[in-house]
Amino acid sequence: MKLLFLFMFMTSFVSAQTRFTDLNELILKGEFTKAKRMIDEKIHSGTLSYPEIFELEFEKERLERIKLDFNKSSDDVLKFINKYYPDLEEKDLIKWEEDGSLEYKIIDGKKWYFSRAASNLFRINKEAKKQKELIEGYKKDQLDVFLEDYIPQVLEESANSQEIFVKPVTFKLNYTVTVEANAVPDGEIIKCWLPFPREGHQRQVDIKFIAANVDEYIIASNDNQQRTIYLQKKAEKDQPTVFNIVVEVTNFNESNLILPELIKPYNTQSGLYKTFTSERIPHIAFTEKIKKLSENIVGDERNPYLAAKKIFTWISENIPWAGAREYSTIENISDYCLTRKHGDCGIKTLLFMTLCRYNGIPAKWQSGWMLHPGEVNLHDWCEIYFEGYGWVPVDQSFGLIDSEYEDEKYFYLGSIDAYHLIINDDYSSTLFPAKLFPRSETVDFQRGELEWRGGNLYFDKWDYNMEVEYK
C-alpha cells in the first residue's frame, strides 16, 4: 500500500516548491549547497512520511538539473555577445539582466547564466536583435519561408474540395536513443520508454509499427494520454546502449473555417467544460497577473473565437520564442512565460491555455514532434473547443503567418499542417508501464525516459535522434 501511494504521489508531483518553508527560503536565495544539506538532514531525521521523503529527494535532484541548465559564466556569455558588440564588458550585461533579456541565477554566491542565455538575447531583446541583423544581415527563417508557401496550398485545396482534412503526408520515422557507455554498471538492465504516435485523430492515421532493435517490447494502448513503446536492454561495459524503433504514420493537414457567429453557447455543466476550463496547478493557475492580463487583452469580448483570437494575437506579438530551460525546473510555466516575457513552444502554449481557460474556453494540451523538411524537432501546441465545431488545433508558437490574407495569417488558430506528429494529448500524465523513479521531463514526453534499478537516467546521460523519410 505504501508503494502504491508513493507511485500515485510521484505521478502527480511536478511542483518546484516544497512544503518546508525554511528549505524554500534557502533555494530562493540560491543557497543550493546548504539546501541539499538541509534535505539530507530532514530525510535522515526519521520523522517524514514516504511522500515527504520523495518530495525532498526530487527537490535535491531538481537543484542539480537547474545547475545543468545554468552553466555559463560571464566570460562564456561575453564571448558570444562580443561577435555583435565587440567593446562590451561584463558590467554592460547588467542592463540586459535587469530587463530580463539575459537569464541568470545566483547559485552558491556565484552568478551563472542559462546555457542559452546569450543566443536568446538576440531573440528576446529588440535592440540586440537589430544589432545582430546589422552585422549578419536579415534572413527569414526557412520554416517561415516553407509555411508561407505551403499554407496557401492547403487552404486552396481545402476550399476546392470542401474537405477539412487534405494533402496527406506519410512519414517513416527512425528514432534512436543512445545511452552513453558506463552510465550504469555492466550487466544492469536499462528500461526505456520511447514516444509512439497516438491514434484516434482524423488527421493522424495508418500508424504502422515496423521494427525495434529488441525482441520484446510493449506498445501502450491509446488510452494512455502520453503514449509510449517500452523496451529494455542489458548494459555492457564500455559500450553505449542503443534503443531504436521504426514506425510509419500518415498525417493530414486540418483546415477549419471557423465563423464566430456560428459558435453555439457552451454547456457549462458538462464534464468537458468543467474539466478543460479549470485551473490545473501548478502550470495553469488563475493568478492575479493572469486576471489582469486577461482584462487588458480580452476586455468584455464574450465570443469564444474572438476572445481566443485576441489572446493568440497578443502572445504572438509580445512573447518572442526563446530556447527554454527544462520544464521540471520551472515552478509555474505559464507564470514564468508572463514574467520573463519569452518562452518556447510549450511555455507559450501553456500561457495561451491558461488565458483561454480563465475566459471559459476549453483548452487541452497536445504535443509531439514537428517534422517539417529541414526543421525536425520536439514541439508543443494545444486544442481548444468551440461548441458546434468541436476540438480544433492551435499552434501558439507558430503564431501569426506573415500574410495580408486573414485566413493565412490566422491559420494556426483553428487549423494545423500535416507535419505535426501527435504523441501526447495531455501533459504530466502517467507512462505505461509505470516508471519507478521521477521522470527527466515531468511535463512533456517527446524524447523518451530511461532508468535502471539505481535511479533515473537524466538527459545528460543519453542522446536522441529522429530520422524522417517522406513518402
Image (cartoon, rainbow, N blue to C red):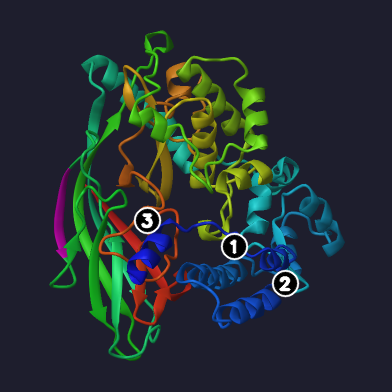
Mark 2 or 3, which is nearer the eye? Answer: 2
Q: Quadrant of residue 383?
A: top left
Residue at the image position 28 percent from the left and 16 percent from the top: 159
Q: Is residue 233 above or below residue 316?
A: below
- List the residue tagged with mark 2: 31
Q: Position of residue 62 (x, y in %)?
A: 55, 68
> Helix, strand or loop at disc 2?
loop
Q: Position of residue 254 (x, y in %)?
A: 30, 29
- List the residue tagged with mark 1: 18
Q: Crowdedness of circle 1 by 10 Å Cα count: few (<14), some, many (20+)?
A: some
Mark 1 or 3 closer to N-term?
A: 1
Mark 1 vs 3: CB contact within 8 A: no
Give the magenta part as a residue range: 206-211
- Marks 1/3: CA distance? 27 Å
Residue at the image position 48 percent from the left and 70 percent from the top: 54
- List the residue tagged with mark 3: 446
Q: Crowdedness of circle 3 by 10 Å Cα count: few (<14), some, many (20+)?
A: many
Residue 383 or residue 58, whichever sits in front: 58
Mark 2 vs 3: CB contact within 8 A: no
